[in-house]
Image (cartoon, helix red, strand yellow):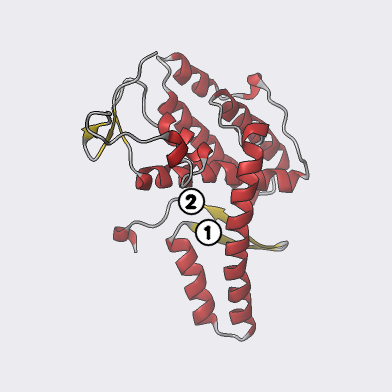
């Protein structure tokens, strides 16, 4: 299968133009699974404009799915998820069978995750378990199952670093609230929200999730 051009700065990548990028060099600054997710975001017959910023934005989208998987497994108190092809959304399979419509198939996964996040908030563990198996099974088809051994170590390292950094902000917010400095506490929460990290106060403690950062227009 031959895909359409990958461009950068509006020009086709080619040796003659000297604007080619080595995957090995790109992966020094971008998580491999984020790059795969970004490349899958365009139909194979469509041109793709490459930039680090675009891959970063795509990575945020992937982390929304990965974050759901992590939270669901914590709630269900499980450490593994079995792949079940029958659990995949019918619409997902339909999109994949329609000329490899991977971008639309990914959109289906996000629909399932959005609905499942609501079930998490409602403590509907039965629905969460079903959605978890479905999401992991769909991502596995695309070679982007974060629980797969090829990604697990890299994802774990990345999530640990993010988690530690966010925890510093959470601790600072808790300290501000204990001093009754609610203005400072709100400022910390708002700044995290601006860059795409949402905090949720629960009876078990503060949890965070990753979503798209606020656009300039919405600030």
The quarter of the picture where residue 8 lies is: top left
For numbered disc 1, what is the local secondary structure?
strand
Disc assigned to residue 137: none
Question: Going from the N terminus, do you reach mark 2 or mark 1 first?
Answer: 1
Please indicate, yes or no, whether residue 148 appears anywhere in the rendered image.
no
Quadrant in the rendering for residue 15: top left
| CB-based contact (under 8 Å), mark 2 and mark 1 | yes
Q: Is residue 46 above or below residue 168?
A: above
* Crowd tier of the residue under label 2, counting other residues whose Cα lies within 10 Å: few below 14, some 14–19, many 20 or above: many
Residue at 44%, 25% (x, y): give it: 102
The picture places residue 183, in percent across and down from the top left corner, at 49, 81
Q: Could you say which is closer to the camera, residue 38 or residue 212?
A: 38
- SS at mark 2 in the image: loop
Residue at 69% in and 48% down: 123
- How many numbered circles does the render carry? 2
Badge 1 density bin: few <14, some 14–19, many ≥20, Cα 10 Å: some
Expressed as whole percent of the image width and height from the top left, the position of residue 67 reads: 59, 47
Q: Give the answer, above or below, for where 61 lies relative to 175.
A: above
Is any atom of residue 151 visible in this view?
yes
For label 2, the residue is 211
- Which residue corresponds to mark 1? 198
Instruction: Name which residue lies at 56% across and 27% down.
Output: 143
- Image x and y of residue 180, in percent: 59, 85
Q: CA distance from mark 2 to mark 1?
A: 7 Å
């Amino acid at each position: 299968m031959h895909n359409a051009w990958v461009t950068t700065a509006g020009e086709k990548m080619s040796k003659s133009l000297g604007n080619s990028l080595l995957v090995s060099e790109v992966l020094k600054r971008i998580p491999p699974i984020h790059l795969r997710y970004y490349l899958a975001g365009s139909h194979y017959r469509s041109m793709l404009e490459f930039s680090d910023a675009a891959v970063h934005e795509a990575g945020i989208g992937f982390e929304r799915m990965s974050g759901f998987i992590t939270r669901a497994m914590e709630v269900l108190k499980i450490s593994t998820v079995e792949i079940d092809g029958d659990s995949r959304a019918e619409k997902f399979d339909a999109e994949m069978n329609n000329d490899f419509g991977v971008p639309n198939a990914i959109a289906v996964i996000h629909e399932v995750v959005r609905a499942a996040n609501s079930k998490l908030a409602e403590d509907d563990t039965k629905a969460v378990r079903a959605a978890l198996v479905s999401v992991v099974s769909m991502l596995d088809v695309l070679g982007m199952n974060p629980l797969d051994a090829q990604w697990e170590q890299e994802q774990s390292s990345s999530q640990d670093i993010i988690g530690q950094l966010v925890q510093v902000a959470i601790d600072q917010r808790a300290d501000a609230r204990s001093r009754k400095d609610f203005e400072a506490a709100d400022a910390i929460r708002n700044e995290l929200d601006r860059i795409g990290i949402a905090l949720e106060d629960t009876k078990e403690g503060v949890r965070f999730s990753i979503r798209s950062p606020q656009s300039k227009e919405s600030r």
